[in-house]
Amino acid sequence: MNPTMSNEPKERREFGSLRLRGRIWWLRYRIDGKEHWESSRSTSRRVALKLLQERAAEFRADVFTAPSSRRVGFADLERMILDHYKVEGLRSTRRVTSALAHLRETFGPMRAASITADLVTSYKAARLDEGASMSTANYELSVLRKALNLAIDANRLSTRPKISTPKVDNARAGFFEPDDFAAVLTYLRPPLRPVMRFAYLTGWRVPSEILRLTWDRVDFAAGVVSLEAKQTKGKKPRQFPFSALPELQSLLEEQRAATTTLERTLGAIIPYVFHHRGGKPIVSYDGAWRSACRLAATDGKTGAVAPIIRPRVLNRIAHDFRRTAVRNLVRAGVDESLAMKLTGHATREIFDRYNITNDADLRAGVAKLDEYLNPKSKRRGRPKGTTGGQSTLRIISGGGS
């Protein structure tokens, strides 16, 4: 049956109209230039007219929700954001999946249009009560906000609640001095030693850039190791001319030789630069790393009463190599814009945050001021506690594959 127009009064048609489709009455109205059709799910014109009046009242009160939005559930939001990460080639899906699991406990049974600012605030308070950190709660809410924005972009939602995630100042300030790194390297498992040496020298990210590095990105003829844009967090290609850093060149040559030997033994090609003895890529290193740091802190002694002689290495993480590399490059006098390109820092703010200054750096700076103010001073050598230039680390070259 063709739709027929109702005979409702003119004032009722200012917002919309009723149409009969088969035996069911439908609402038809236009908002912001977009036409909406909504079923009244009733054969009664009276029921349909009442629903139309409710929609008009919602519109006037600025609380209107489009029919399509009423059908969007939390499961739809999950699918949208996971699809987005897959299409964009983003790598932090594990963290997003974890955040969605927490969000699902609260918002899972709800329609997306039912998520309000009050519910968001209550969720954050509950997560903090559970022991989650402020940055973790903010990240989870940023995932929810992104999912809602994707639904809006897809015309599945018309609006979303305001979700505030204020910046939390919890930036780490850790870095490695050469002797601390040498100690940790001593107790690290052989397959991980070249990985961490590479990280120390380049400042590249261990999980996403170093462990995934393949031999086709290492050009021995040109003396350059590179990453494609899709392989970096900032989505920009990067190069590191290792031939200008003999220790890094030796590391890669040793790793290439060990890999070739293992390939002959296994009778298979090993695509990854850093791998286990069986040629498989290294997936996890957290346990081995923490163990090495504990042993380095006690100089290899075990037991509950083992004296801690290097307390600063107990809480070191592999990401501290990025701060270390930045500081080493700046100390060496490398132009900061070039240093940012080498380490892959996209913004000056993050680069400056990683450029850690310690007491020895400050003393060295004051010593330079003294030399400027007192050019005829017979003072020789460096003040106690200064480090001056820092040579390239040359320790424990072997590491196996």
Image (spheres, helix red, strand yellow):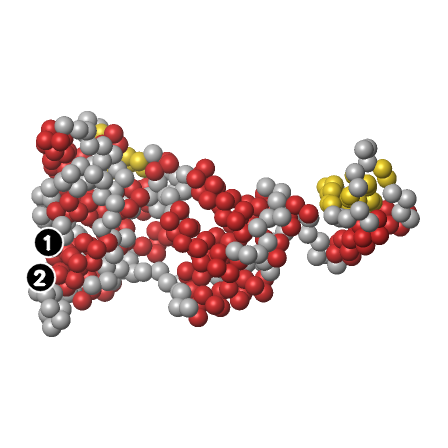
Question: Along the polypeptide, which appears first: circle 2 or circle 1?
Answer: 1
Residue 246 picture quarter: top left
Q: Which residue is mark 1?
A: 186
User: Judging from the image, what secondary structure is the residue with disc 2 in?
Assistant: loop
Pointer 2 local density, CA inside 10 Å: few below 14, some 14–19, many at least 20: some
Residue 118 picture quarter: bottom right
Describe residue 115's horizontal placement relative to residue 276 as left or right: right
Measuring 15% from the left and 57% from the top, which residue is drawn there? 292
Q: Which residue is mark 2?
A: 300
The correct choice, above or below, for 310 with respect to 272 in the image is below
| Three-letter amino acid code at the position of disc 2 | Gly
Q: Disc 2 and disc 1: Cα gap in Å? A: 9 Å
User: Judging from the image, what secondary structure is the residue with disc 1 in?
Assistant: helix
The correct choice, above or below, for 200 with respect to 130 in the image is above
Q: Position of residue 336 (x, y in %)?
A: 32, 47
Quadrant in the picture for the N terminus: top right
Describe residue 238's horizontal placement relative to residue 109 as left or right: left
Q: Position of residue 338 (x, y in %)?
A: 31, 42
The correct choice, above or below, for 345 with respect to 293 in the image is above
| Three-letter amino acid code at the position of disc 1 | Thr
| Residue farthest bottom in this picture | 305
Q: How many marks?
A: 2
Residue 357 picture quarter: bottom left
Measuring 22% from the left and 43% from the top, which residue is drawn there? 282
Quadrant in the picture for the C terminus: top left
CB contact under 8 Å: marks 2 and 1: yes
- Observer able to see residue 182: no
Measuring 86% from the left and 50% from the top, which residue is drawn there? 12
Q: Nearer the viewer, residue 186 or 19?
A: 19
- Observer able to see residue 320: yes
Q: Position of residue 366 (x, y in %)?
A: 24, 63
